[in-house]
Image: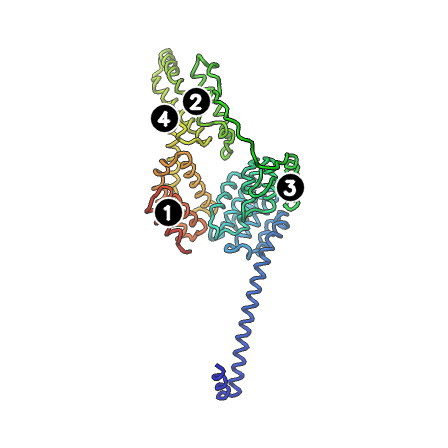
Amino acid sequence: MFALLALGIVVGGPDFVAQSYAIGSVLGGIILLIALGSWVMALLDLVGGLVWPVLRHTVIAAGLVRTSYWLALLARFGWEREREGGQVVAAALALLHRSHDAALASWLEGKIQARAKSGLGGIVATGLLAASRGDRHGARDILLGVDGFDPDFAPKAARRAANDWLVADAAARGDWITVMRRGVQPGQATAYTRFLARAAARIRGEALAGEPNPTDFGLWISWLLAPGRKAMRPLLDQARAAPRVLHQRKPPPAPPPATVPLIDPAVHADDPVAHAQALHATWLALRPKSAGQPATELEQRLSATRMQELCRAWEAAWAPAERHMRQRAAALTAQTRAEEALAAIRRVVARELAELARAAKLPLDSFEAEVPTAALAAEELRAELLGGVEAGSEELRARTAADRRLPPAEESRAWNQFRRRYEEAVLLGGMALRYLMFPQVHRDVCGYAVWLWNDRKEYGLSGPMFQWLLAEAEAVGDLEAIELQRKNVGAKR
């Protein structure tokens, strides 16, 4: 090397030296610019990570929607692969910190829809926007889908924003178990959710995972570190008023009490129909009053034994009911036969029994096959579960074939609704129903996921679908589906 350089100097003379110096200066400048660029990018990345928390506690907390949208540009480097998502999430969070403004909501909705892909930021912003409009059930439905998003395409800031709202919503509904579970989730917990989780643990007299039941001082420190302290002061006082549990050692469970009839049959000893109707009305009164409302009391009280008691009461009521209907039909010279009218009533009762079992999360085997009323109710429940899954699966297949695309958040919501419907059918119907449903579900969902992957490049949505299909294929032992989904899960983006 040095010999060649010396030869070049001897042969080329001063011109060679000048040219070499110029080339060296240019290369040195390029190397210096590359180094400076790397430092600038690292600095911007650091600043981006710091800007987002500052925005959350200042302009976003002040409800400045448009200002939050534009200032979120400074936090783009903290949003990993989805740098535009921070803007719509910032604006949606700001909208929640003020009374709902329809004009601002429409402006933000336009910004979300203008985005080419359904990144997690757009989905979270749509959920928060629904919450701002008062649609808490819809917001909950959308934001719960964040858990199923591919972690490689899910910025932490977006997941934390969704989790913050879900924890706050659960606390507002008094669902302390959900608050405790979600409030300390690794990677999603914030000072805000940790305070809510510790307060919930104190109220319930339980300990969080890896933590003792919080002390008064610990609650106070958590409250100081959390934002929105003024609004959460009543919860702090409620938690501190609850006695602290010093250990988790629980006393041995008391023996279960003997099951006694819900309504004493002696009350209606002369009228089995009235007895069945009274039992039936008692359980119907515990059903949720509105869609989305949890059936907590019904789940706690309607056991398999109680359902069997109700089915037997109706079975004992049919014979006297038929005699009474025959007498009425003869007296009124009705054209409708008593058997036909009674069959229609039996079908209505069976349908309502199936609805009660579904709301109480009672599996199909809770019904006694040897009791005709119970068998008819089980048939209704099975048909309802299977029909819902088949209709949802067919809807996914039809939209895929027609290339009918939904807005980003609605696409995620549609998938999560179908998945919950399928998992409910598996929970209540058991493996027999799972084996029956899987072939169609695998065909339709696989085609849907491939469409999202290949045509729409929605890797964050479709990747978890392939993983879900693989888990289901392994559960039912479908070797061909297992092999296919292993290839899909390993596909490169």
Q: Nearer the viewer, mark 1 or mark 4?
A: 4
Q: Amino acid at mark 4?
A: Ala
Identify the image quadrant of residue 205. top right
Residue under label 2 = 309
Tell me if residue 457 comes above or below residue 307 in the rendering: below
Residue under label 1 = 446
Residue under label 4 = 369
Instruction: Return the disc, 3 or 1, that comes first in the chain's sequence.
Output: 3
Label 3 residue SS:
helix
| Nearest to the observer: residue 393 or residue 428 | 428
Residue under label 3 = 219
Residue 247 is at least partly visible in this image: yes
Label 4 residue SS:
loop
What residue is rendered at 48% in x and 51% in y? 151
Q: Residues within 10 Å of mark 3 (few under 14, many from 20)?
A: many
Are the two marked residues, 1 and 2, in contact with CB atoms closer than 8 angstroms? no
Instruction: Return the disc, 3 or 2, that comes first in the chain's sequence.
Output: 3
Label 2 residue SS:
helix
| Nearest to the observer: residue 212 or residue 340 | 212
Q: Residues within 10 Å of mark 2 (few under 14, many from 20)?
A: some
- Can you give x and y, in whole percent of width and height, for residue 14 in the image? 53, 87
- Can you give x and y, in whole percent of width and height, for residue 271 in the image? 44, 14
